[in-house]
Amino acid sequence: MPAEQIDRLTSIARRRMVTANQYIFRDGDEAVSFAAILSGVVKLIKTTASGEQHIIGLMYAPEFLGHTFSNNHRFSAAAATEVELCTFPRTSFSRLLAEFPAMERWLFEFTARELDICRDWTLMLGRKSSYERVASLLLMIARRARYTGCAPLPDNYAQFELPLTRSELADYLGLTLETVSRKISRLKYKGVIELRGTREVIVPDIGVLSVVANMDSCGEGLTDRQLFTQQS
Amino acid sequence: MPAEQIDRLTSIARRRMVTANQYIFRDGDEAVSFAAILSGVVKLIKTTASGEQHIIGLMYAPEFLGHTFSNNHRFSAAAATEVELCTFPRTSFSRLLAEFPAMERWLFEFTARELDICRDWTLMLGRKSSYERVASLLLMIARRARYTGCAPLPDNYAQFELPLTRSELADYLGLTLETVSRKISRLKYKGVIELRGTREVIVPDIGVLSVVANMDSCGEGLTDRQLFTQQS
DNA sequence: CGGGATATTGATGCCGTTCAAAAACAGTGG
DNA sequence: CCACTGTTTTTGAACGGCATCAATATCCCG
């Protein structure tokens, strides 16, 4: 990015810290600013017609929050962990975009990628079993943690703190918290993951996790009843 | 849109007709062209790692097909009905975009809206019951049919031909074709929809359909067994 | 009318939910 | 450090919705 753009950006930027579980903006609010995530994890939350709230996405650094076009937010954003933001007043930011087409184009690409990710997720939610869904979500978090984590990690190994509670994981996946808990227990029993306490997750081999996430080999020849008298 | 842009666009445009069930492009193909849908309905189809194909979206006129950035398609597109396309060679089209920022911006907005729609759909698939899902899909198709249909329709009334088979509807919704069939039967029994033959759907009151689609009032006081000995 | 594809209907079983209880965890004050 | 309390997580048992397997019925088109 050319120096001039960076200068102009920093001239309108403001740093903002948000503590865990605090809202950044709410569904329906006027979109007064645009923000880049510098560190931490942000939950995207949608409020349905009937008033329930549901998690529809997670955003990590270095991604963006906010709509470029519509004047109101279409979902809420809340900090899942402590979050460090870099915010830009929306009007000034729009002006910059108009001035630097390359920047707008970059944002466009970012949005297009988001759309691809969302479509993949749709596919996932539609067809996968609960076991695969939990594995898929852990896989996604593990992969993103590898990028944002500072420690150089050996290949195929991941270790991270879950930014969500069981209840939130369940909500994201369209399951109940009990089911999520059972599937996590099963992943642990199978050796796919290890747990330190209840939030710290270790994935010894990401390849194994991704196999579990994609295919339907949950039972591996044995029915659940044969293993545990518990559902797969 | 200024006359110059339109001229330039038409100068590189080519008309293309596609018969029902014919592919327009395939997942992984090099993206050689960009297309506007002039009439008809297009299915977006994703191929999973395990090779199954699944419908992930429907596109109506006057929407767009094709990626502006990535060089390969991330999903397949096939005609659901007879489709009339207006195609543009991708390289010339990209050049035009660079030349007319307003056009690029318009496409950007379109993509952002697509993302919103996709997120709503994700929410839907995650939590709604089969009955609500079928109702939601019919509602979406009914609403879009109202726009594209030429006949001036009285408020709250819709009539349209389903562009998908039961099996395709089921695939889109992450259900089985049997379940979809049952739910459609139930919608008919409840008077929410009427059927002429098997594809032609009449929605006497779209408001009623949207109520069914959003809330969980499927039983309306009676369990299914009490009604039919059939599932909700 | 006939035959293949598509759609409806039926019966049964499994997966995820629901309701319920116990266990692990985190925070607080003694 | 430990007892105490509220919250989060795990585990258990039973129920219900959707899938699966199977049989009919209907549509479409020559």
Image (spheres, coloured by chain):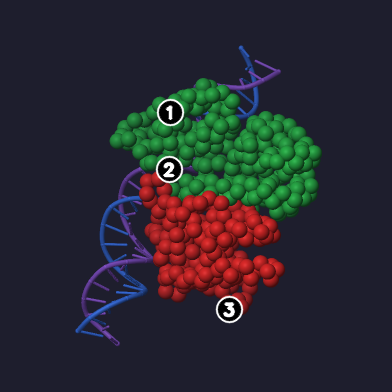
Chain colours: A red, B green, C blue, D purple
Discs 1 and 2 share one subunit: yes
Taking the spot 63% from the left edge, 58% from the top edge, the residue there is: A97
Chain letter for mark 1, please: B
Q: Residue B205: which numbered mark, if any?
A: 1
Dot 3 amino acid type:
Ala
Give the Cα separation between the discs numbered 3 and 1: 59 Å
Chain letter for mark 2, please: B
Give the Cα separation between the discs numbered 1 and 2: 21 Å
Discs 3 and 1 share one subunit: no
| Dot 2 crowding, Cα within 10 Å, few <14, some 14–19, many 20+ | some
Of discs 3 and 1, which sits in the foreground?
1
Q: Is B153 placed left or right of A50 in the picture?
A: right
Query: Where does label 3 land, which residue?
Result: A151
Chain letter for mark 3, please: A
- The reply to whether callout 3 and callout 1 are in contact (CB within 8 Å) is no
Q: Is residue A140 visible?
A: no
Along the polypeptide, which appears first: circle 1 or circle 2? 2
Give the Cα separation between the discs numbered 3 and 2: 43 Å
Dot 2 amino acid type:
Ser
| Element marked by disc 1 | loop
In this orientation, which residue lies closer to the viewer: A126 or A98?
A98
- The reply to whether callout 1 and callout 2 are in contact (CB within 8 Å) is no
- The number of numbered badges drawn on the structure is 3
Taking the spot 73% from the left edge, 42% from the top edge, the residue there is: B5
Dot 1 amino acid type:
Asp
Query: Where does label 2 land, which residue?
Result: B129
| Element marked by disc 2 | loop
